[in-house]
Amino acid sequence: MSAALIAGSVWVIVASLTAMLPMRRQMLPGLALLLSALVVLIWIGISHGWLWATLGLLAFLSMFRRPLSYLWRKALS
């Protein structure tokens, strides 16, 4: 397994553990995960191609749908 996929797997595990935290303690790790996801997805895309990066992006959007919709609404208002 490549380093990019290992980083992606670690990201998923950390995101799952962060989701188990109480809501008020999720903010800082969630923001770090939100920012680091872009780096990991680009790394996966460079290493394995756009198909795998797209699948990773869809998984990311599924996990962060509520925070992203909040940020989207905040940006539009």
Image (spheres, grey):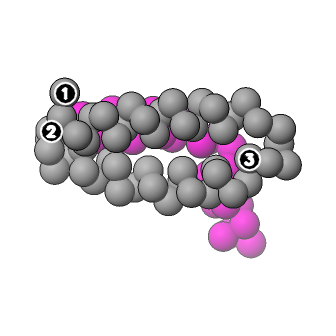
Magenta-drawn segment = 52-77
Give the side of residue 38 with respect to residue 54, left or right: right
**Badge 1 local density, few (<14 within 10 Å), some, or many (20+)?**
few
Pick the residue in front: 31 or 72: 31
Three-letter code for the amino acid on which mark 2 is drawn: His
Q: Residue at x 18, y 35 (%)?
A: 2
> In x, y percent, where is residue 64?
59, 42
CB contact under 8 Å: marks 2 and 3: no
> In x, y percent, where is residue 61?
51, 40
**Badge 2 local density, few (<14 within 10 Å), some, or many (20+)?**
some
**Badge 3 local density, few (<14 within 10 Å), some, or many (20+)?**
some
Three-letter code for the amino acid on which mark 3 is drawn: Gln
User: Disc 2 marks which residue?
Assistant: 48
The mark closer to the camera, 1 or 2, is 1
Classify 12 as above or below 4: above
> In x, y percent, where is residue 54?
30, 39
Give the side of residue 75 with respect to residue 55, left or right: right
User: Disc 1 marks which residue?
Assistant: 1
Three-letter code for the amino acid on which mark 1 is drawn: Met
Pick the residue in front: 46 or 10: 10
State how far apart marks 2 and 3 are (Cα): 31 Å
CB contact under 8 Å: marks 1 and 2: no
Q: Residue at x 72, y 66 (%)?
A: 74
Give the side of residue 18 with respect to residue 38, left or right: right
User: Disc 3 marks which residue?
Assistant: 26
Tag 1 secondary structure = loop
Q: Residue at x 27, y 35 (%)?
A: 5
State how far apart marks 3 and 1 are (Cα): 30 Å
Earlier along the polypeptide chain: callout 2 or callout 3? 3
